[in-house]
């Protein structure tokens, strides 16, 4: 894992568009291909904002710092261009698109990756979709349902994993994918991520989570603790375990020391 | 394309079907509407005396009725009507086979994809070019079953009794100002008769377009679905773009006899300077079902409310309507159901999309007469706004004179959300594609009721209209 980072942020700062207060106050992060990074932090620490800023959510604006993805200036790319370049974000609260089947949605997403004038072969697509669903142990009928329309929390997350499997990103950002999931659904998500990474070992994963429990099922290479818009502690899986015991309280104290310094 | 400012103002640059084929009409009436024009039309068609009388009475009713003051803005209409030709006849005789159709007219149809559809899928085609049927074919086995699918003129000529028994019984000339106008100057349209018990698997289909500048089109269609029969009629049209106002006012009458099942599908895409004021009504007898599937795109103003008069026990009426109002357009559409017998049921599902300065209004009437016990009606209106400026209104009129009945009404307005667009873009779709996908999903419940080639066409037309809706 000595490759160049696929994602590198330096001093990344951001706020909600047209609001005064910064939420990210200088985030430095380097993720290499194949690495799994977990970002943990209390509510309001900015961990979810980081995910959205990387994916290009229009509700946030970058106020400073840089982010490079696979050698390109990520901040110069539109949301859809980032996706086509290989960034994928699994949503915490995926929205419903009534009347659009998952299959149709994914076909449109794959078609968007082709050159102008190139047509995605329908049979090829069907093969890809079925093969991906089989890998994730999903029933083919799932793809006929309208995207997230009337889905349970677990179904929404399965849908995110399926999209990730079909779109084959080089960086998968899981934005609190574990929130609101029962333990079975959590296992499904974890198995999905693990399966996909086994299949494509170069895929980097950024797990954004409040809880340690997801990390029981997806083992991170690195854990970062974010408090008040800054990464205050980075280390191996043991950092997550220490959080489990001490909570974020200790790191808040650490944060005030850092700020004071 | 005329480099007229008015045309550019309403953003017609990307209008796909803007092409004009050269042709010389055989006969053209003078501008405006008067008795002379009406007499000329009737004489040109060699009609029986009763029809001329009917037309002249209708003209008197038209002149006596004031312009409607509800619905869309008709204030410019009077001056428009003074300028248009009320009758144009491109050819002297009816065509039976595709080979006989003049080349320039074929070209127009070719560009609309008609021949392929006709050869591969469709069993019968009635294509209305300007005011007259120029091409009309019917599958041999249907003729053997006694099905009549003719131009309205031939219907009158060849089936005088059947015609007279039903003509103007569903929509009398005096129904409204525009049905009176149509009754005075009608020309072209279809006459359809499905004999008792006959079931048609493939739809009957008419495709027509207006092509003569400043020409009003007043098609008149009369359909009789006899007892226990089952059929589907499809009408679709697209008109080329002109710089001056244009006008279309059709009358569609359908009689659905006991136990029959009839569906009428329209996809209309008028050029954006067209006034489209149509009266469509069905009379639905006991145990019969009538379904209207109505798609309205384009036009400057459309006022159209397909209706079902449920006059027999357990009659059922269903209206599915979809409207797209782009810049400068007003779609005032919806449906009307009248319950006049016990255990009748109806449903109206209306979906509209408004973009830019477009305005989509749902206008619906549900009337339940006393004695229509256990009548049931359900109305659902769903409006999608593409951007901040777009407008939608709902005007549901409900009149219930029977306590023992159930009427439900639901209306929803949604905006294409930033989160939805972001979600789709985060999967790699450009913004325009994301928007189109959301809109396709919105109309999917209606599109899936259409035959495949029409669903594809509807999606394509809407995508075309959506172009440039982003940014």
Image: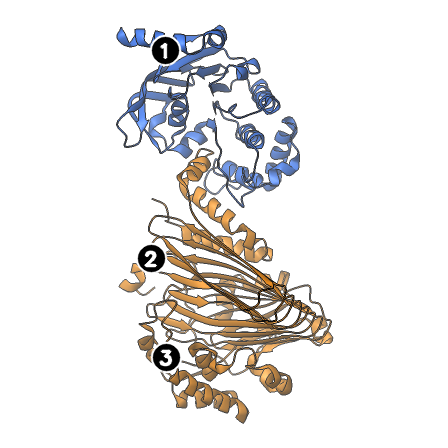
Which residue reaches farthest bottom?
B49
Query: In this structure image, what is the colour of chain A?
Result: blue
Name which residue lies at 62% across and 84% down: B165
Comparing A119 with A260, the one in front is A260
Instruction: Judge the density around disc 3: few (<14), some (14-19), many (≥20) Cα neighbours within 10 Å.
Output: few
1 and 2 marks on the same chain: no
The quadrant where residue B15 appears: bottom left
1 and 3 marks on the same chain: no
Label 3's element?
A: loop
Residue B168: percent from the left, percent from the top? 54, 81
Q: Nearer the viewer, mark 1 or mark 3?
A: 1
Distance CA(mark 1)–CA(mark 3): 77 Å
Query: In this structure image, what is the colour of chain B?
Result: orange
The total of numbered circles placed on residues is 3
Q: Nearer the viewer, mark 3 or mark 2?
A: 3
Distance CA(mark 3)–CA(mark 2): 32 Å
Tag of residue A252: 1
**Cβ–Cβ below 8 Å for labels 1 and 3?**
no
């Amino acid at each position: 894992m000595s490759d160049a980072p696929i994602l590198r942020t330096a001093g990344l700062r951001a706020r909600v568009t047209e609001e005064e207060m910064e939420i990210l106050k200088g985030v430095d992060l380097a993720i290499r291909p194949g690495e799994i990074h977990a970002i943990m932090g209390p509510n309001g620490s900015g961990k979810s904002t980081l995910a959205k800023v990387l994916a290009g959510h229009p509700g946030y604006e970058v106020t400073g710092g840089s982010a490079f993805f696979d050698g390109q200036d990520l901040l110069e790319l539109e949301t859809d261009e980032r996706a086509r370049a290989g960034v994928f974000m699994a949503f915490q609260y995926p929205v419903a698109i009534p009347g659009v089947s998952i299959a149709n949605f994914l076909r449109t997403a794959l078609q968007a990756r082709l050159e102008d004038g190139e047509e995605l072969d329908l049979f090829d697509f069907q093969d890809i979709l079925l093969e991906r669903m089989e890998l994730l142990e999903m029933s083919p009928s799932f793809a006929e349902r309208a995207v997230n329309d009337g889905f349970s929390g677990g179904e929404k997350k399965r849908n995110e994993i399926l999209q990730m499997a079909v779109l084959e990103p080089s960086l998968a950002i899981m934005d609190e994918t574990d929130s609101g999931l029962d333990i079975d659904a959590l296992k499904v998500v974890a198995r999905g991520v693990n399966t996909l990474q086994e299949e494509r070992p170069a895929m980097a994963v950024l797990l954004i989570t409040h809880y340690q429990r997801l990390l029981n099922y997806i083992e991170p290479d690195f854990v970062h603790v974010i408090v008040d818009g800054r990464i205050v502690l980075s280390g191996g899986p043991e950092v997550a375990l220490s959080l489990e015991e001490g909570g974020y309280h200790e790191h808040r104290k650490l944060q005030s020391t850092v700020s004071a310094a | 394309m005329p480099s007229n400012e008015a045309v550019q103002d309403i953003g017609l640059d990307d209008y796909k079907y803007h092409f004009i084929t050269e042709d010389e009409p055989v006969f053209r009436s003078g501008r405006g509407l008067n008795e002379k024009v009406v007499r000329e039309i009737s004489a040109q068609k060699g009609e029986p005396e009763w029809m001329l009388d009917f037309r002249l009475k209708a003209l008197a009713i038209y002149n006596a009725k004031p312009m409607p003051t509800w619905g869309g803005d008709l204030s410019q209409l009077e001056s428009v009507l003074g300028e248009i030709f009320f009758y144009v006849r491109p050819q002297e005789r009816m065509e039976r086979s595709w080979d006989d159709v003049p080349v320039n007219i074929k070209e127009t149809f070719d560009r609309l994809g008609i021949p392929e559809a006709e050869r591969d899928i469709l069993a019968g085609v009635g294509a209305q070019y300007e005011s007259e049927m120029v091409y009309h074919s019917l599958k041999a086995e249907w003729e053997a079953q006694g099905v009549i699918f003719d131009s309205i003129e031939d219907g009158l000529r060849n089936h005088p009794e059947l015609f007279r028994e039903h003509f103007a019984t569903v929509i009398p000339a005096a129904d409204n100002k525009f049905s009176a106008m149509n009754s005075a100057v009608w020309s072209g349209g279809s006459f359809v008769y499905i004999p008792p018990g006959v079931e048609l698997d493939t739809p009957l289909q008419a495709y027509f377009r207006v092509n003569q500048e400043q020409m009003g089109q007043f098609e008149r269609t009369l359909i009789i679905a006899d007892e226990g029969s089952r059929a589907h009629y499809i009408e679709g049209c697209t008109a080329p773009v002109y710089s001056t106002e244009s006008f279309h006012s059709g009358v569609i009458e359908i009689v659905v006899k006991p136990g029959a099942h009839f569906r009428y599908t329209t996809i209309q895409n008028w050029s954006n300077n067209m006034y489209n004021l149509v009266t469509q009504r069905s009379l639905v007898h006991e145990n019969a079902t009538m379904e209207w599937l109505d798609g309205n795109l384009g036009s400057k103003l459309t006022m159209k409310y397909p209706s079902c008069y449920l006059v027999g026990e357990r009659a059922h009426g269903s209206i599915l309507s979809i409207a797209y109002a782009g810049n400068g357009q007003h779609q005032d559409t919806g449906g009307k159901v009248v319950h006049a017998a016990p255990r009748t049921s109806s449903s109206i599902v209306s979906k509209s999309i408004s973009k830019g300065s477009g305005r989509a209004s749902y206008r619906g009437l549900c009337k339940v007469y006393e004695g229509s016990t256990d009548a049931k009606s359900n109305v659902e209106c769903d409006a999608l706004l593409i951007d901040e400026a777009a407008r939608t209104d709902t005007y549901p009129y409900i009149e219930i004179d029977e306590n023992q009945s159930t009427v439900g009404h639901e209306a929803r307005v949604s905006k294409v959300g930033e989160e939805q667009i972001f979600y789709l873009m985060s999967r790699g779709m450009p913004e325009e594609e994301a928007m189109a996908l959301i809109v396709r999903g919105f109309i999917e419940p209606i599109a899936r009721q259409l035959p495949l080639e029409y669903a594809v066409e509807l999606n394509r037309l809407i995508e075309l209209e959506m172009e440039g809706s982003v940014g």
